[in-house]
Structure formats: structure tokens, C-alpha cells
Amino acid sequence: MSWFIVHFAQIVFYFLAACTVAGAIGVVGFRSPVNAALSLLGTFMAVAGLFVLMHAEFLAAVQILVYAGGVMVLFLFVIMLVRVRTIPEEPQYLRSLAPAALGVGGLLAVLVGAGLWAAAQAPLANPAALRQVQGLTLGNTEAVGWSLYRDYLLPFEIVSIVLLVAMIGAIVMGRKEPGKEGGA
Amino acid sequence: MITTTHYLMLSLVLFTLGVVGMVVRRNFITVLMCVELILNAANINFIAFSRQLGDLTGQVFAVFVITIAAAEAAIGLGIIIALVRLKQTVNLDQVNVMEG
């Protein structure tokens, strides 16, 4: 029992990591887009749990709200709207897997090297630093808000413009052209 | 003790699965989902390093990444709707409008 308590963080990490990877494999492997979307939902949930484990509580909430709540509903609605089942599935997979595997493998090697090098550069910091605002220990949400609205105000505004442009673009593309009959 | 390396390895697996899916799958909707996987892997990296360095910048950038991901999903799905209206397919092999 004490072993369980001592290793609780590890157990949670490995459980969430397994859920993340299993969901990702489901996204790549399932033929039906609905199944793939539900696997993706599992991945999003598990990643939110990992965020909590990394002392990013605010981001875990945002992950659930934006991904599981917004993006996932969008995906499911589009899958429903386009009636993918009536669309012929073949050919499903790319024929030449060897170049793809080679490219991904090379990329992977570079990334592993860079990540391990970077991870070895600094010791693990005190997690309380992620909850502090000007020396005061408040909470992760307050700290992220402080940083977002004070240090990164201009990027924040630019990102809001990006969202506006994306919204207008999506509306324009999704709209039926005037004077044209028929649709999806 | 869960180190940053653990998180990097996990994000690496997630990223690789995303890239493999993006290259291998022919369904536009699934390809978009794979892009989401890749962005999630990037977020795990951002937050893992934020945790290691005790610096909130990583978390702020993860907020930006999530925003961009939402915008990308909206645009991508808008493209899918327009594509289905135009070609009645979401299979990327059959979409060669630009090639003529």
C-alpha cells in the first residue's frame, strides 16, 4: 500500500500516457471517422490529465473546454454533415510507405537528440514558481493571466485577430453560393 | 520521479503517430485530426519545459497553440464542407483541383 502511495505520480503518469498513445493509435488506425474522433477525445482527456500532473491546471481546463468541448463537437458535426459513409473508402492507405517511414524516422532521431539534450540542461524547478505572481503565491490561473495580459499582451491581441479571421473565413467557405442549387 | 524526458518521449510518440497518420491516411477529416495530435504533442513539450524551468512562458505559448489549433480546425472543416459541395468526396487522392 505504501508502495502505491509513493509511486502514485508514476502510476498516474503511465496510465495517462497509455491512454494518450492508445487514443492516438485509434485516430490513425480506425477506418470510421466517428471512431477516430472518439479516440481523439480520449487523447485530449488524457493530455488534460497530464497537464494537471505538470502543474498547469489552467491549461488542463482550457484543453477540456476548447478541445473536448469545441473542436470535437465541430469534428462530429462535420462528419455528420458530409455523410462520410456514402463516400467510397478506397484507396484508404498510401502505397509507398518506405519513404514516409524513412522521413519520419530521420525526423524522430533529430527530435530525440534535441529533446534529450535540452532536458539535460537544467535541473527541475520548484513547481511553486508556476503559481506565483510577483512573489505572491496565488494560483496557476492567476499566474498565467498575469503573464498573458502583461508580458504577452500584443501576441494575445494578434491571436484574437487570427481567430476572427479564421471565423470569418470558415463562414465564407461554408456558405452556400448565392444562386446555386444543391449542397452537401 | 517523472522527469522531463518522460514527457518528451510521450510527446515524441504522439507527434510520430500524428505525422504517420497525416502521411498515410487519405481521409481529409482524419488528416485534420492528426494535425490536432501533433499540436497536442507540441503542447506537452511546452508545458514539460515550463515545469522544468519553473517559467510560465511555456504555458502562455500553449494557450496560443490551443487558439491556433481551434482556428485551424474551424478553417479545415470549412474547407471540407466546401470540398464536399464541390467534389462530393473527402478522399485526398481524388482532390486535384489545383493540378488542373
Image (tube, rainbow, N blue to C red):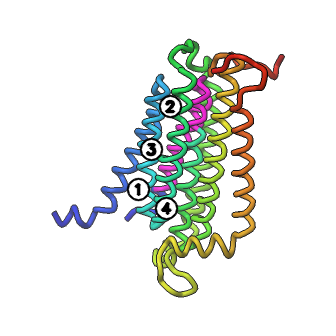
Give the letter of the chain under mark 2: A
Q: Is residue A112 left or right of residue B87?
A: left
Name the residue located 72 percent from the left edge and 17 percent from the top edge. A181
> What amino acid is at disc 4?
Thr
Q: Which of A144 and A127 lies nearest the eye of the viewer? A: A144
Q: Amino acid at mark 3?
A: Thr
Local packing at callout 3 (Cα closer than 10 Å; few below 14, some 14-19, many 20+) is many
- The C terminus of chain B - image quarter: top right
Q: Name the residue beneath numbered marker 4.
A: B4
Magenta residues span: B7-34
Which numbered mark, 3 or 4, is in the foreground of this view? 3
Residue B79's spot in the image, x, y percent? Answer: 69, 31
CB under 8 Å between callouts 4 and 2?
no
Check residue B62 for magenta coloring: no
How far apart are the alpha carbons under marks 1 and 2? 22 Å
Residue of label 2: A28
